[in-house]
Amino acid sequence: MKILVTGAAGFIGFHLSKRLLERGDEVVGIDNLNDYYDVNIKLNRLKMLETQSKFEFVKGDIADRDAIDTLFKHHSFDRVVNLAAQAGVRYSIENPHAYISANIVGFTNILEACRHNKVAHLSYASSSSVYGANTKQPFSEHDNIDHPVSLYAASKKANELMAHTYSNLYGLPTTGLRFFTVYGPWGRPDMALFKFTKGILEDQPIDIYNNGNMIRDFTYIDDIIEGVVRVTDKIPEPDPDWNGDAPDPATSFAPYRVYNIGNNNPVKLMDFVEAIENAIGKKAIKNMMPMQAGDVPATRADTSALAKDVGFKPDTSVTDGINRFVSWYRDYFKV
Ligand SMILES: NC(=O)c1ccc[n+]([C@@H]2O[C@H](COP(=O)([O-])OP(=O)(O)OC[C@H]3O[C@@H](n4cnc5c(N)ncnc54)[C@H](O)[C@@H]3O)[C@@H](O)[C@H]2O)c1
């Protein structure tokens, strides 16, 4: 297949492109290479992808309508996976407009291009953050998600709503991917594992939010990719049992689905830190901090829909995943 991966120079986009190329797909990757975090890591990910003859990179912004129209004029895509977005909860407090541009305007352009070019399936990154203020655990796709607590979360929920309208109006099959805290080699420098590893290795204090009283369903990158590939291969169909008198948020009368892709095995933040200390062989200097605005204290994915529909359940242990990340980090930065 010929697959468009947006955000291909990003953490998940890089791993997904690599995996699709390995199985023989042709991949076109688009990314604007913005400097939200160290651009070198994006360029180095791209360097690895560009060794593959079936990979083509286009530098461009998904919020640029002309650029997206031109891209779709030059290529006929069997699938589109939209991962390009302004990520991060905390950054959305200071930089709201970045989220509207990439996540709302950009996603509109992708929807329109998929509609007019009759793409067989659009899958797109949503996030566990859509569960917002919900406290019922584990988080299920059947739950109502009307209480986002950050603009980032609201932009991801908006993507799901926008996708639903396109699935309804134009019969465009869409699948939303609610990722739960993704970590692993080539991970994002703005996320906890990267920052903690760097801090510990450099004897710098690490900031621990909510005094460590956080629980996260950390999900290893290879598990995320396995889930994304399986879900992208499965084109959603209308749910014949969907009933507007008791509307189930998880499915629809239209070809629309959303899936949690998470570990269903949440870890206390302090245990996560301890696992990193063990992997490095050194104790962290901990700077206990209050809860950050926009953050949620606990996440846990109900993954039964993923298991039922595509026969996959993430299962990499945090210890294995952290060990693999730390070896990558030491190798990449030669420390
Ligand atoms: N990593 C996680 O834990 C996590 C969790 C939930 C959801 N997500 C979502 O998954 C997707 C991928 O996340 P990631 O961790 O790989 O983030 P990332 O920041 O590493 O990747 C996103 C990539 O998109 C690019 N990009 C941003 N805006 C763009 C635009 N307007 N046009 C073109 N390219 C643009 C960036 O340069 C970056 O390379 C995002 O949509 C993110 O919101 C990630």
Image: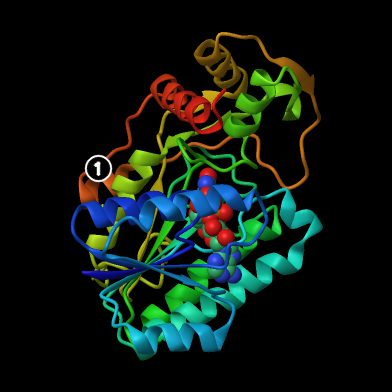
Q: Nearer the viewer, residue 241 or 52?
A: 52
Q: Quadrant of the C terminus?
A: top right
Seen at 42% across and 28% down, the residue is: 265
Q: Quadrant of residue 164?
A: bottom left
Q: Is residue 128 visible?
A: no
Q: Is residue 311 above or below residue 13?
A: above
Q: Quadrant of the N terminus?
A: bottom left
**Amino acid at dot 1:** Phe
Image location (x, y in percent) of residue 10: 50, 54
Q: Nearer the viewer, residue 255 or 9?
A: 9
Q: Is residue 10 above or below residue 60?
A: above
Image location (x, y in percent) of residue 137: 50, 37
Left or right: 155, with 25 as reference point: right
Q: Nearer the viewer, residue 267 or 165?
A: 267
Q: Is residue 95 above or below residue 65?
A: above
Q: Quadrant of residue 167?
A: bottom left
Q: Nearer the viewer, residue 9 or 79?
A: 9
Seen at 45% across and 88% down, the residue is: 70
Q: Is residue 177 visible?
A: yes
Q: Quadrant of residue 100?
A: bottom right
Q: Residues within 10 Å of mark 1 (few under 14, many from 20)?
A: some
Left or right: 155, with 160 as reference point: right
